[in-house]
Amino acid sequence: MEKRIIEGALGIVEKQGIKFTMDDLAAELGMSKKTIYTVFRDKNALLIAMVDWVFDFIKDSEAQVMEDKSLSLTQKIRKILGVMPENYSNFDFTQFYVLRDKHPAVYERVRQRLESGWEMTYELLNQGVEQGLIRSVDFRIFQLAFESAVERFIMGDELEKNGIDYFDALDELVTIMVDGIMIKQS
């Protein structure tokens, strides 16, 4: 039931944004609000579960990148930084900017999830340094810069105002960040 509600809510967000109501969700799922409230005590709890659901999918996708033997180290670094599960390719992450004011606990959860789980990325970056592909830089600063940009993408309305797609922005960010630490091969 939890999975069905979360997936339904993600579908609603994809169609009409984060400002959906529990009535909208109940209608979409063909169930009563009372049933939804037996699983999630309120919209905040549902939104937090949705954030965790999406980030868990991202972590699963990162694990698949790590295991993919067909990718070079550089390709793995690029993919792991820009990983997005296929089933969220139409999802508009720029809509999350409304969370800051209306749902601060959810906003904080997004921040926590952005800032955690960098172990695989650090492992790849360190391998790149050992192999002479990447300059030795302070990867904590790399992480902070990357997190700050992604947070701004999803928590600010600049992308939406400028008509920039989230996935295009993420791809460009990955290119800028990775190219900036690569050692130029002659």
Image: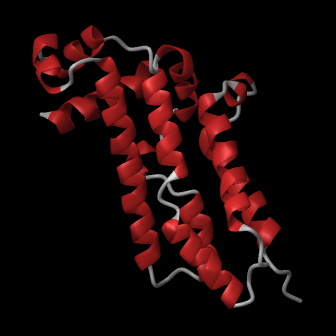
Where residue 185 sits, quadrant-wise, is bottom right
User: Which part of the image, by quadrant, shows the C terminus?
Assistant: bottom right
Q: Is residue 45 left or right of residue 150?
A: left
In front of the other: 165 or 180? 180
Residue displayed at 27% across by 35% down? 7
In front of the other: 1 or 166? 1
**Residue 25 percent across, percent down from the top left:** 26, 17
- Up-down relation of residue 81 to residue 161 (above or below): below
Q: Is residue 111 left or right of residue 34?
A: right
- Up-down relation of residue 84 to residue 73 (above or below): above
- Up-down relation of residue 128 to residue 181 (above or below): below
**Residue 80 percent across, percent down from the top left:** 54, 64
**Residue 19 percent across, percent down from the top left:** 44, 14
Count all numbered tags in the image, as a single digit.
0
User: Which part of the image, by quadrant, shows the N terminus?
Assistant: top left
Q: Is residue 48 visible?
A: yes
* Farthest residue, direction right: 186
Residue displayed at 31% across by 35% down? 49
| Structure colour scheme | secondary structure
Where residue 101 sits, quadrant-wise, is top right
Where residue 184 sits, quadrant-wise, is bottom right
Q: Is residue 91 visible?
A: no
**Residue 165 percent across, percent down from the top left:** 64, 37
Residue displayed at 74% across by 68% down? 138
- Up-down relation of residue 138 to residue 149 (above or below): below
Residue displayed at 20% across by 24% down? 40
